[in-house]
Amino acid sequence: MNRRKVIALAGAGVVGAGAAAAGAAALTRDHEPATAGTSGAVDFYGERQAGIVTPAQDRLHFVAFDVVTKDRDRLVEMLREWTAAAARMAAGRDAGLIGAVGGIPEAPPDDTGEALGLPPSGLTLTIGFGPSLFRDADGVDRFGLAAQRPAALADLPRFPGDALDPKISGGDLCVQACANDPQVAVHAIRNLARIGFGTVSVRWSQLGFGRTSSTSTSQATPRNLFGFKDGTANLKAEEESLLREHLWVRPGDGPSWMEGGSYAVTRKIRMLVETWDRTSLAEQEAIVGRAKGSGAPLGGKDEFEEIDFTTKGADGQPAIPEVAHVRLAHPDQNGGVRLLRRGYNFVDGSDGLGRLDAGLFFISYQRDPHKQFVPVQTALARNDVMNEYIRHVSSGLFACPPGVREQGDFWGRTLFG
Amino acid sequence: MNRRKVIALAGAGVVGAGAAAAGAAALTRDHEPATAGTSGAVDFYGERQAGIVTPAQDRLHFVAFDVVTKDRDRLVEMLREWTAAAARMAAGRDAGLIGAVGGIPEAPPDDTGEALGLPPSGLTLTIGFGPSLFRDADGVDRFGLAAQRPAALADLPRFPGDALDPKISGGDLCVQACANDPQVAVHAIRNLARIGFGTVSVRWSQLGFGRTSSTSTSQATPRNLFGFKDGTANLKAEEESLLREHLWVRPGDGPSWMEGGSYAVTRKIRMLVETWDRTSLAEQEAIVGRAKGSGAPLGGKDEFEEIDFTTKGADGQPAIPEVAHVRLAHPDQNGGVRLLRRGYNFVDGSDGLGRLDAGLFFISYQRDPHKQFVPVQTALARNDVMNEYIRHVSSGLFACPPGVREQGDFWGRTLFG
């Protein structure tokens, strides 16, 4: 029974105590596999968490939480409740068994209701654990987890030019909600925050209105707010051997609880679009290293062609400048390391100085951020001429555990179980 | 030639100086009429501005500008440029004749590029003029317009409970961009800001991710972040005689330049969703006056039935409480006045206090806000029990002139021309 059916019943006046029983029906059901832009459901259960190689949905609501309890059991109980709610919402159902229009008028609804009548919309919910969950800013091991902290979860270094705001950085837990309907993504995060009341508190939250990456060869490369295709060389769901090498944590990589998981790095990158928009087309293309229209590398013809960084222009200089973004970020220039990116464009109103507060909420997944994101970002932070037009204002690092195998399993079982 | 065709050419490497000529082709073209959720185009030209009775699109980017020039001619020239760009973008084309990938590498692109390849997506752009354009905060009539200021554009009164932030209120000009793809709405506002650089400055800007109103009988009533259907009694595009009575400015209503226009009132209404979510279903329904599931008035059966405010419950009390939102806001309780609402849900991250910064960006259109919005909002501000869960944090009032009749006509011609 999905949300659409529940509301049909509610309209007919027959939803009462029975809704709880109906809501408790088996979690599995027939559904169409969701692809970008569709309304179907994505499987919540599996070996890996959904929302990593899932074809990138169109909209994002990302949230970081602080854990406000010191009670480990209470935290684990919340993770169990979250998992059950996440599975229901991914299937297009209410967050709770009773729902928004259930049979107990004297109790708060078990779902906030704004997604009533909306289909699953490809919703995925992906959880991650931040470094501070293992040892907080005061060095306290609140939950007895310090020995389980992977080396890969060591704090990121400060990069040249970083302008991070600590209020919108870090976090003990994160949840990434991606969906093809933003109301469905917002509804999911809001209901997890509701369920976690008293156990966790929202530290920061970010909406993204448009995907900037493809995570499947079936998807066209979208455009960022510089107007360019970016992330053409992104890891894709179909590249299984590359995913094994670069995305998923393997036995021997660190503590076993992360085997089959992946590490997320988030960066909120403010783009100074007003300055960019007054830059010539030729300069924009030189900074990016690609043609604005086709996305082809400079000196090339096709977006997806192998980039030849030795190509010279008519002036005898490299067709792709030494400091172009595409060169500095390319695996060939970074010891072959790859990332899986699934970032989103954002506009958060204006900045009080006459400009839009706009940019890229960068999300990357990888096997070890210190061997992948850190060296690439170090090269970019030092040399990328694009830095004149961007500011990194928030940063997050999260260990995303393996998938929830089946009903009864829960987010974090391998860590807490 | 729409954006999709331009990019196909760009990919084939044939876009050069010719793109400018192609971009300058006739503005009219065949298109499918857009409805909510579709990718087609909405006519830009017409007797009325689009974006008022147009079936409410799914996504919003609303912006208010300050005029930073004192030169009336420069302002008018910008309005002409904006109008041409708006017509092109509504048709799914680049903002400028040269485009993002045009033939002049040494010049900044004529379009920012992030909507390349995207269809028109039902984009409408609607302009309004704020009270401060006619006489600024210091009483200065910068543009010789003071005598043209309609009585209906007098500043709104302060309402009980108002918690307005002046930095995100008011504005000399506003543009409402609605579309079914948020990237198309963002692109449109950003390009108008780019074109207006040096003439106007962004004062505030608001994204809305989900429509909360229907403006056509063909649309289902969506849900706000309280999880309820709201605005069921909204004015609809099909109700022509009601629109003449309540929406469009008529001859004799004030200065003739507004004939055929309408007045917009915007209110950013923060919803304290965390508090709401801990309120019982029965209390939520009593506050709203409707069933959460079906949207039917309490004591009734169907969302769209005529509300009988005299119905008593089993306890002998009114089924719809005296202070329920639906009663206080209903035309029957407000001398029959009606509004056309086309608001949007928003989430602007978090508030630094552990809560989502979420709510409703309310937009209403009407023939005279002082006879329509003001009395209704006065009643709500005084008595609505929903006030415990909401805060009005921003307010805007704008005179939206009649439509742009044809190519060569421009936004504001009846005022400046």
Image (cartoon, coloured by chain):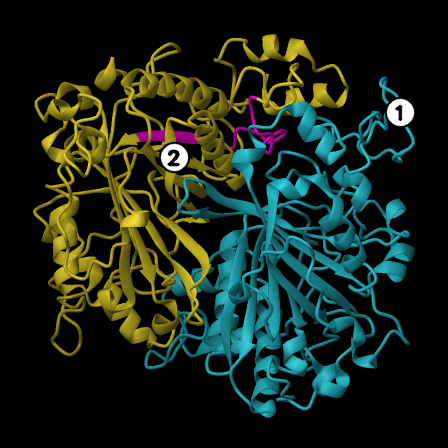
Chain colours: A cyan, B yellow
At mark 1, the secondary structure is: loop
Q: Magenta region, mostly helix, strand or loop? A: loop
Crowd around label 2: few <14 · some 14–19 · many ≥20 (10 Å): many
Kind of residue at disc 1: Lys
Question: Against B177, is A293 above or below?
Answer: above
Q: Quadrant of the C terminus of chain B?
A: top left
Kind of residue at disc 2: Ser
Q: Where residue A297 sits in the image (x, y, percent)?
A: 80, 31
Residue B117 left/right relative to B286: right
Residue A85 left/right relative to A245: left
Is residue B47 covered in magenta?
no
Crowd around label 1: few <14 · some 14–19 · many ≥20 (10 Å): some
- The mark found on residue B201 in the picture is 2
Q: Residue at x 45, y 38 (%)?
A: B36
Label 2, label 1: how far apart the Cα atoms are: 42 Å
Q: Quadrant of the N terminus of chain B?
A: top right
Q: Residue at x 25, y 61 (%)?
A: B297
| Residue A9 visible in the current orientation | yes
At mark 2, the secondary structure is: strand
Q: Where residue B101 sits in the image (x, y, percent)?
A: 65, 22
Mark 2 vs mark 1: tell me if same chain. no
Residue A317 left/right relative to B72: right
**Closer to the camera, B368 or A170?**
A170
Residue wearing tag 1: A312
Q: Residue at x 76, y 87 (%)?
A: A147
Q: Which residues are magenta?
A: B110-127
Q: Where residue A81 sits in the image (x, y, percent)?
A: 57, 80
**Closer to the camera, A113 or B99?**
B99
**Chain on which label 2 sits:** B
